[in-house]
Every structure is written in C-alpha cells, then in structure tokens.
Amino acid sequence: MKNYDKLLNDLAPQKFGKAGVIWTSSLIVIIIIGLIAYIDQIRKGLVVTNLNDYALWGIYISNFVFFVATSFVASVTVAVLRLTNNSWRTPIVRIAEIIAVACIIMAGLTIMIDMGRPDRLLNLFIYGRMQSPIIWDVIIIPTFMIISLLLLYFPLLPDLAILKTHFKEKNPTLSKWYGRLSLNWTGNPKQTKIQLKSIKIVALLILITGIILQTIDAWLFSTLFRVGWDSTNMGAYFVSGAAVAGLGALVTVVYVLRRAYKLENYITNIHFDKLGKFLALACLVYLYFNINEYLIPEFTSKKEEISHLNLLIDGQFAPLFWLVIIGGLIIPTIILLFKKGRTPFSIFVVGLLVVIGSWWKRYLIVTPTLLHPFLPIQGVPKSWQHYFPSWHEWIITIATLAMALLIITILVRFLPIIPIEKTANEQELLNKNTNS
Amino acid sequence: MKNQLSIIRTSFLVLLSVFMVTMSFAQKVKKNKVRLSVSYTKIMDGELYFDIKATSKIKNKNTFIPNLDLTIYNVLNDEEIKIGKITTNMDGKGRLVLPKLDSIHADSTNTYTILVKFKGNASFKKAKKSINFKNANIKASIIKKDSINFIQATLIETSLNMPLSEATLNVQVQRLFKSLKIGKDFYTTDENGTILVSIPTDIPGIDGILTFEVVLADSDNYGTVKAMVTAPLGTQIVQDNDFYKREMWSPRDKTPLFLLIFPNLLTFAVWGIIIYLILNLIKLSKLNN
C-alpha cells in the first residue's frame, strides 16, 4: 500500500476559505440576476434583446461558439498529450477535463437561451433534417458532453476510492458519496486493466468527437452562403481557434488553482513552460488560418468580400478586430516565444488576453456577416443595420460565464485537482529510478 | 340698458355667424379633388370589364385613393341607368365586370356611354368621369400555309359589320407574368381588316400548348378588344423537377442517402463505444474482489 498521506494533505479537496466563499457567492448572485433576466426574456420574448431580422444571431451564439471552442481543451490536452506520451501532462489533465465538462454543459444551455421558444426544442428532433448541420450539432453536443464526463470519471475512480478512506472519519457523508462514485474500486489488476483500456478509448474518442464538434460548429456558418462564412477554410480555422481558446482557458485556470491551493510543488514552472510552448504553437497555427481567412478574399477582391473586410479592417468593427488579432493573438504569441514570457504569471496574463480575445473573436465571426446581407438594405428600419447586445443579453451572457466558472468551482471543491494515485505512482517510479 | 343688451346679442350672433361660415369654409378647403380614369376591355367570347382608377393630388403628389365608393351608370338619351357599384382597393383601383355587352345599351349612333360617379365624402369632392365606345370584334384563327403556322385576325365593327382597316393590333403569346409580343410591336390591318402573322416554332409551352392573344389596345373608339386562340404549336417544356429526388434542400423524408448513412453510422458507432464504456463502468463495480 502506498503512502498517500503527504499527497492527500496537499491534494485532497478542501473546504472553501474566505476568498472561496466570497468567490462562490458572487458567482451565485450573478447567476440569479441572469436567471431573472432570462425569465423576463421568456415572458416577453426575444423582443428584450437587440436581435433583429438581420442580426438574428448575436451575443448568445458568439457565446455558444466560445463555449464549444473552449470545451476542446480536453481534446487538445488530455487526448493529444496522452496519445503522444507526454508524461508532464499529469497535474494539468484533470483541470482540463473539468473545464471541458463545464464548457460543454454551458454550450448546450446557451444554445437554448438563444431560442425564442425553448419549449419547442423537441421540434428539432421531430422535424429536423439530416441535411442540416444544426441537427448534427444537436447530436454532437450531448455526445461530447457524455464523453467529457466519461473522460473525467474513468481516471477519477482510484482517487475517489482513496478519498473514501481519507474522509471516513473526517466526513462520513462525503466518504459515503466518494465510496458510491468509486464503484467499489480496489485497484485490482482486472479493474486496472479495464480502466486503462477505457481511458485509452475515451481519449481517442474525445479527440475524434472534439474535431467533429468544432467542424460542425464551423459548418453551421460555412454551409450558409454568406460573406465571411462561405469559406472552405472554416473547419480547420475553428479547430485551431478552439485549441487557442481551450489552452488559454487552461493556463488561466491552472495558474489560479495553483495559487489558491498552493500547488507549486506539483504544477511547476516546467509545466507552465511546456503549456506556454503548446499555446504558442496553437496561436501560430491559428494565426496561419486567420491569414488564409482574410488575405485570400482581400486578393480575390470580390465586391461583397471587400466591403465585409473593410468593415473589419477599417470600418465599424476595426477597433475590436485589431484588438483581437493583435492583443489576443499576435502579442500573446510573441510573449510566449521567449523563455521569460513563459513564467507562470506572464502565462496567466497571456492566457487572460487569449481568452478575452477568443470570446470577442467569436463575436466578430458572427455579427459583421449578419449585418452585411446580400440583399440591399431597403425599406427596413435603420436600426437593423447595427447590432449591440441589450442589457438582457449582457446580463444573461455574463451569468452563463459565471455558471461555467461555478461548475468548475464546485468540481474543484469536491474532486482532487491533481490525480492523486497517478502522482503517487509517478513519484514511486521516480524514487525507484533515483535509488537504483 | 335694453339697447346695450340688444347690441351684445347682435354682436354675439354676428360673431357666431362669422365663426360658422369660416368653419364650413375651412372644411370645404380641406377637401381634395378626385381624378377618375376609366378604361373598357372586351374579351372575345368572354366577359367585359371597366377598370376604374381613383387618384388625387395630395401635397403635390399623385396618390391612389382607396375605399372610394363609385357608382357606374349606362347613359342612354340623358337617362342614367345604374349598372353597378364598386369600392376602390388599396391601390385606388376597382373593376366592374359584365358578363355580356347585351347588359348595356348603345344610343342611336351605336355608341355606348358609361359614367362613373363619386358622391363625395368628408375628405374628397364629388367627381365623375365618362367614356364612350363602340363595339368591335376580333375574329382570330390559326391557319397553315406552306407548313408555316400563321395567326389570322380580322377586326370588324359590329354595328356596321364592316372590317376596320389601318387599325393597329398587337399579337402576343401568354406567359406567366406578362404576355410576350410576337414579331413586330404591332401590325396594321389591311383593307379587309385582317392581319397575318407567322408563328415562331420555338416558343415553349406546358405540353406545347400556347395561348395567343390578338389585341386592339386602348383604341379611342373601341376601347380594348382581345381575342384568344389556344393551339399546340409550342415546344414541349421538359420539367427539370427534383421535388421527388433526394436532395440537400429536400424535406427530411428525402434526405440524400449519403447523409442518412454516414452521420447515422458515425452516431451509432460513437454511441456504441459510449455504451461499451458505460458497461465497463458496471463491470468495474463488480470486480472488487
């Protein structure tokens, strides 16, 4: 039997401190305010939003695309690092799995918020056509949600069994729950064999479904004959963008948890350095697809494409566009290319820039195209030529972001952030190697 | 004192009269003038109708007047015989349809007079408009000469049973939105009141059937007279109808097969693995010894 005492002392879930209580309460208050705004939206209809016949997708869909993109974190970190046998992944994979679960749940909820009549959701299944990417999206989101949960759950089993014993005397109720969730895990060879095999399968599955999810999300746009969306680049563009958003969210959360739970011995500067390089690579790939997305239409100079690009480059959306491209992509890449830029704090700042940039990037993908219809704007209210979210939209969107953070907070409160059993095994192996 | 009261009463009455007169004058000033226009159309072997249009110049802009009640009379020797009533639609237009020309009467010169009257209302002054026309017929038929098909049409004034020469007729074929003219813009009738127009062989029609129209348009004396001939002289339209095919834009029961097979195959494969993984969880819970 291994000695988990030190590890459990450091890694076992802990009660919230003062800061944790304030943080959680603040999130709950924001969610309640958002819920009130949403009930008002249900009562009065989408008229409380600034959505109109042109900007029929606004901040809700931008937010949905952001959540879907961020949920890709599990595919890039857990699956890619596992399949490429990167052993440094151990202390960060669970955080990535937790973020993925929170984001995909919120993606599912956000798409329902965008519906004027959520009670008609069932109609999507009754009357949906397999030709429509919307139906593919309806299928893939719950599928990805289940796979994300399985990816979180399988590696957790040994830790849940350890926590059952750990909390037996301290907190019997919690211990009982850990016991139930651990599925009578004893760590015998038969169980270990099945568990390891399942983890391998689910890792491969989340990589495939992750790419499918991002591609379907891209096809929701690119299958529409609209300027700015009608692009064969869109699938790869979305996958690479999702890697950036996911890794950006991961480094930010990892930094915060490392500080909050004093995990400096487990999540070291080396981890940040590696994550920084990984994020830099993702940013460079995404930058490449951005160049493809904007430079080719600029060259071919189709009339509609040019007026759309003008809107982004030096028009109404130019400040936001350049802020996203320079602040959210180019500057982070430059910082990350230097070793000094990959220290924990600078990576945290870069992560924040990337996440904020990623959120607004989705807004820039959704909104300007909608405000630029092929048919000339004639005989319609002038206000339809512009879109800026209403207070209802802002409050509800902020509440969904708060809800994602609350899910992460709750999971972090009750689950070990760093895999205890795996860390113990690695330490044992390290000690053996050192002794020999 | 009595005098003072009388002066006050008189002044009040004068002021009241002035006010009333001004009021009624002001109301009169507000009324707009209605312009009526009437046109007469006769379809050979069919109905005849009068198209009436009501406009008014409001704020220097010609505006169509909707919901105007108009009465139509057949005037015969100064006698006005009511033949119908219409109300203009949102475009300021209305149509009175008569089944036969026999339902109205011509005067001794074989001229028909139709009078349209508007009684006036709170917004518009009363108005009237009359038109005169004589009866004319077009006899149209398809003839074949040297294996070329022609439309032959003769314009006749019915009262005198005389052909009308030097009249201009349009020859056209009916299309979905607007008739398509055949050959020249118009044809002039010869001394026999006849025209002869060759029919092109490449006009498409449903099942090859075409409806030709010979029209005397907006004649000062005879109004509009239209004769129609239907003949299978067009080229067959081969309908490229993909309604029953499986296409990307078809309803759900006509989904293309590849879109039924691959996404479903992928979905079932992924869910099959998910079920396998869930079964593994159940298996794990039973392997605790």
Image (cartoon, coloured by chain):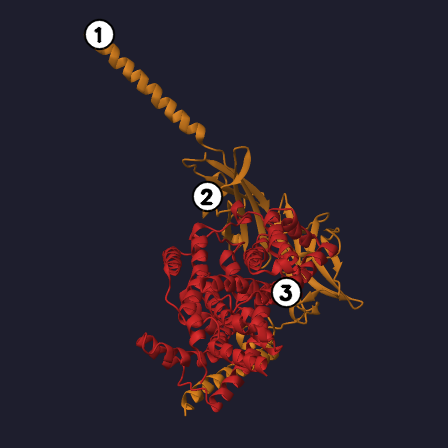
Chain colours: A red, B orange
Labels 1 and 3 in the same subunit? no
Element type where label 1 sits in the image: helix
Residue sitting at 60 percent across and 49 percent down?
A317
Q: Percent from the top left, x then y, of residue B46?
A: 56, 58
Res A277 label: 3
| Residue B89 % position (x, y) | 48, 48
Q: Are marks 1 and 2 in contact (CB under 8 Å)?
A: no
**In this rendering, would B279 be left or right of A33?**
right
Three-letter amino acid code at disc 1?
A: Asn
Please state which amino acid type lies under the numbered disc 2. Answer: Leu
Q: Above or below — where is A324 with respect to B7? A: below
**Tag 3 subunit:** A
Q: Residues within 10 Å of mark 3 (few under 14, many from 20)?
A: some
Q: Which residue in the rendered view is the most extreme toward the left?
A: B1
Instruction: Measure how far apart labels 2 and 3 are at the Cα level.
Output: 84 Å
Residue under label 1, please give it: B3
| Type of amino acid at the residue the image marks with label 3 | Lys
CA gap, disc 1 and disc 2: 55 Å
For marks 2 and 3, give the one nearer the viewer. Answer: 3
Is residue A367 in sight in this rendering? yes
Q: Earlier in the sequence, mark 1 or mark 2?
A: 1
The residue positioned farthest toward the right in the image shown: B146
Q: Residue at x 42, y 72 (%)?
A: A9
On the image, the x and y values in percent for residue B18 come to 35, 19
Quadrant in the rendering for residue A33: bottom left
Q: Quadrant of residue B69?
A: top left
Do the residues indicated by labels 2 and 3 lie within the same chain of the protein?
Answer: no
Mark 1 nearby-residue class (10 Å; few <14, some 14–19, many ≥20): few
Secondary structure under the numbered disc 2 in the rendered image: strand
Residue underneath mark 2: B70
Do the numbered discs 1 and 3 sit on residues whose CB atoms are within 8 Å?
no
